[in-house]
Image (cartoon, rainbow, N blue to C red):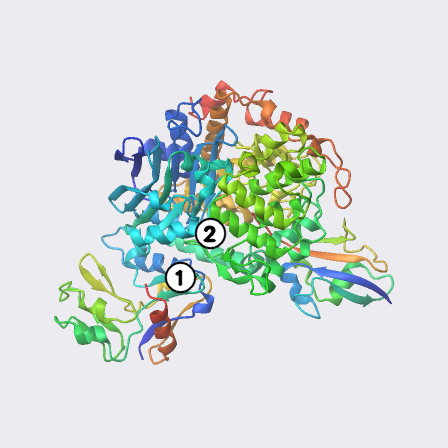
Amino acid sequence: MMRVFIKLTGPLSKFYRTSRSAKKEEVLIAEGSTVADLLEQYDVPREAVNLVVVNRHRAGSSEILQENDEVWVIPLAAGG
Amino acid sequence: MNGWMGKILRVNLTSGEIVKQPMDPDLARNYVGGRGLASKILFDELELDCDPLGPENMLIFVNGPLTVTGALSSGRYMIVTKSPLTGTICSSNSGGYFPAAFKTAGYDAIIFMGRAEKLVYLWIHDDNVEIREATELKGMDTHETVELVRRETHKEARVACIGPAGENLVRYAAVINDACRAAARSGVGTVMGSKNLKAVAVRGTKGVRVADPEELLRSNIIADHIKKADLGIAFAEFGTPLFVDVMNANNIMPTRNFKEGFFHEGDVINGAEMIDRTLVRSKACYGCPLNCGRNTRLPADAKFQGRGDGPEYETCFSLGSNICVGDLDALTKMNYICNEVGMDTMDAGTTLATIMELYEMGLITEKKIGFPLVWGDYDNCIRLLYLIARGEAFGREAGMGGKYLADKYGAPEVFMGSKGQGFAGYHPRGMVGQGLLYATSPEGGNHTTGNTIQPEINGIPEPMDPLTATGKPEMVISRQDETAFIEACGVCVFPYMLLEEGTEIIAEFYSAVVGEHYSEDDVRKIGERIFNLEREFNRRLGFTRKNDSLPKRLTEEPHNEGIGEGNVVPLEEMLDRYYQLRGWTGDGVPSEEKLKDLGII
Amino acid sequence: MGKRIAFTEQLCTNCHLCSMYCSLAFTKDGIFEFRPSIGRIRVAENDDDTKYVAHVCLQCREPACAACCPAGAITKDPETGIVMINDEECTGCELCIAACEFGCICMVDGTAVKCEVCDDPLCVRACAVKALDLVDADDSVADQGDLYKEVPL
């Protein structure tokens, strides 16, 4: 097992296990897990996700995660 | 007339003369309303080289044929004038409830000319229009002004006014309506102040005719569609501040005067933090089902006190990340201050960021400012904001804006703006199309003339690489033209910008209101006409390619770590292609052929 | 059993779409017009901007408006429970407006008007946050009434 951190933005914060106000959560996943595995573990539907950023870099769903990676999940959104 | 009220109000503040003019149907057909109608009036009537703060300048408040018609988000107005900040034609947009009021009072536009001898306000109650003395309102903030004017006119009057910043001619003064909404950019509040016009109060009870209401009821279905989509849920729940996270994750949240695109304290100034700490409830503008507005208040344990609306995303950038303020209470307080004194949060922020960098470089001293101003020092920022609004001490100079200060103190390259107006909260090194947009916007660093966020970052309608020039000139032209049309209609750009079929939808609504079929191509052509007219206006004032510029920080200094690391904005190559596609010369001048084809000359 | 329009304040966003669309329902002579000032549902804000309240007739059990009308133009339909104003009998005296402590009656072109519960109310359709609902007239109006008095038009 290894430890990574997940940041769920905006409406995706409903998938946090601790609280919607968490800002970031520490989670244990199997060594060699991918971004897709982590999202599946959190039940985050793929269509809701616009972008995943791992340690500040764009990541595909098959990217393999490492210990202490910060995984930031962004929904579709706009502003002004 | 369907859509339009058919009347333009002309108020000569010098003579006190008030005239009601019928709307010219040809003008309506070719330029519609809003920014289109008003820009055309300025083009035809304004002494081009007039002093923007002189009596010859015209200040136009204008709604559109779709305002108060049930078309999606149909409650907006624009203020159009010659800008004292940029020297160009400019238009500033606002929502709230005031736009609906002057539409239902019976006017498509209100044109202010001249200058009142003493401070005055205008009171409109349907057909009854009066100029009234406002000497007791002098120096009052925008909240107090609304209260007092309502007491003297009608308790439900909707009021647009300036605060001390506008009265003291701060070059980025705003016109604040309904106490918390702002037509903020380009110094429209400064022009209002230069005319000694403190406020416009309106009560309207008339009706707006439409040809096909069934089609307009469809707005609700579309609204439902937006609201059920993740996009819409996010918008209603978090408001525009949701965007802090999106921008930060994409490494395009301008930080430290655009040196970087990532702000470490983004988590404490975003929409989620607002929900936890300051949000009272969501709020909608008149006629809008998306309720993205933030009704907020500072909690009892906060270092500062106050209540109001916001901050919106742009303010989270300009008075947050870009000046390294990672504190929601301070950011919220600065937002409230700007609303109360009547100042653009964006250029106030750009000015502060410029000062901070000049201070860091040792070009502006503590002695000069009266106190230090380091990155993130919100206490001193607050002090300075008040000094700026009052035109006191260093505040007097700071009220001239970031470009003025950067030039004066010997580092013009640190002003992060174009044509003298600060950029919006999207870092062009990470989304280069937005850089092209900023450079070619009629009033400089403004993003509202064609925000490229949907195509470049959200991949709607198709994924684009935000870092390269590919497809950007075409996309920016398309965004600019469709936005010009939307802004001519008197509606909010948001839903039309968010939806892939946005332009098709507004063409349908426009057709349903006016009772004539307009296709997507038809409305784009009108938008193209408006955009080119504004370009030609500026061209006649000497604005060409040399003014379509971006600072070297964006075009030469590589982007920081994260997405887009090392990237710069390939402006010149995009400009070449952009001008070509627009039918302009290589120097950015609209060709005679193009202007004739669009009916501008 | 009769119906009335119920309003849930916590959901309201102050958008006024209800007023806009209500006015459309009263379009005359084939002209379609949005004229929110004549809507039978109208929204008020309180002083510190913390409450938005849409005023729409509660179809009172013992309507004060009917009781005070000198022309007898206001009656409560025994079957539907809806309180109706006969515009031909209305003399425009405005006593009903003063009598209604909830601010639900207004004058339009010299006649008093109020919500008379459309079969398919446009206000309910137009509200994007479902703050309005068609409910049985029997449903308690106490909270809604108190709200109207707290945040008058």
State the separation of the CA atoms marked 1 and 2: 14 Å
Percent x, y of residue B50: 42, 24
Closest to the observer: C117 or C15?
C15
Closest to the observer: C152 or B171?
B171
Secondary element under disc 2, as helix, strand or loop, is loop
Seen in the image, is B289 located left or right of residue C1? right
- Relative to C135, residue B463 above or below: above
Percent x, y of residue B550: 64, 31
- Relative to B483, residue B329 above or below: below
Marker disc for residue B180: 2
Mark 1 highlights which residue?
C47
Seen in the image, is B217 located left or right of residue C90? right
Q: Quadrant of the C terminus of chain B?
A: top left
Amino acid of disc 2: Cys
Rendered residue at 60%/50% (across/down) = B316
- Relative to B397, residue C70 above or below: below
Q: Is residue C24 in sight in this rendering?
A: yes
